[in-house]
Image (cartoon, rainbow, N blue to C red):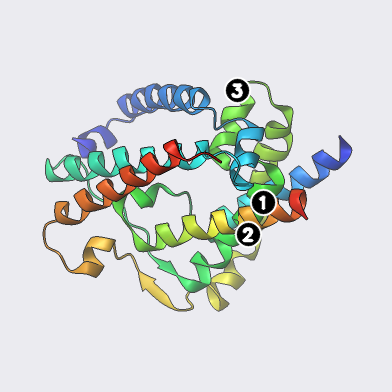
Amino acid sequence: MTTILANQSGKQYAYGLLIGFAFGFLLQKSGVCDYDVIMRQLLLEDFTVIKVILTAIITGMLGIYAMRDAGWVQLHKKSGSLGATLPGPLIFGVGFALLGYCPGTSVGAVGHGALDALVSGVIGIMIGAALYAAVYPKLERNVLHIAEFGNKTLIDVLGIGNAWLVIVPVVVVMIGFLFVLENLEW
Amino acid sequence: MLLRICVAVIGGICVGFGARWGKGCISGTSQLVISSWLAVILFFAGGIIVAMLLYRV
């Protein structure tokens, strides 16, 4: 289904726009486009961000694997290496705390008129990505391929043939964790 | 106000740079990709440490 969609760029834009509207609306509605909500998460005072992310992972996981089983989509797994997956996310995390938004929530916050998200967020992120492109050849040669560990999933690592035997327990654990977060007094 | 803009621009540059270096967003977590989970944990670790240093130390 998605291959058919990918060959019809007009339809693909239309679906993308529709899903983008829904994504932005729900991101805003969940409260995670708010600077204070994000900072209070990083200070471990408010767990809205973690709750939204975990809920999204649960629904995403069930949806993606169900659609894969139905033959509608293929998995798009990115491979990692210590040279890429260790320093990159750490730098991202530092920026996340300094800026108070991640890329998606920056754009979401621009929607409610947050100028810091526009000037520092969207434009800053583009400058950062451009700087990365400038140093990419050097990183590619010297750092990115250090200790590669491929694009294995938890299912591959456990060596279990039926993905759902891994997905269902993982979902149960995540729901349990959400339940604890929801009922804990901080 | 000026301080906030300067810090936030540096933050934005780090976010863009780190996102590219770490090969993208956290959407791989839904596929249970190990590298994606490692990335999410590290990006929160970095964020929590810096936020604590900024506001709690």
Give the CA distance from mark 3 to mark 2: 26 Å
Percent across and percent down for residue A63 are 24, 38
A8 lies left or right of A34: left
Q: Residues within 10 Å of mark 1 (few under 14, many from 20)?
A: many
Q: Residues within 10 Å of mark 3 (few under 14, many from 20)?
A: some
Q: Residue placed at 22% from the left, 66% from the top?
A: A156
Q: Residue placed at 73% from the left, 33% from the top?
A: A116
Q: Secondary structure at mark 2?
A: helix
Of callouts 1 and 3, the N-terminal one: 1
Give the CA distance from mark 1 to mark 3: 21 Å
Q: Secondary structure at mark 3?
A: helix
- As drawn, the label of residue A30 is none
Tell me the quarter of the picture where residue A66 sits: top left
Answer whether residue A109 is visible to the viewer in this image.
yes
* Disc 3: which residue: A111
**Residue at the front extreme?**
A185
Of callouts 3 and 2, the N-terminal one: 2
* Disc 1: which residue: A95
Percent across and percent down for residue A8 are 28, 30
Percent across and percent down for residue B42 are 53, 60
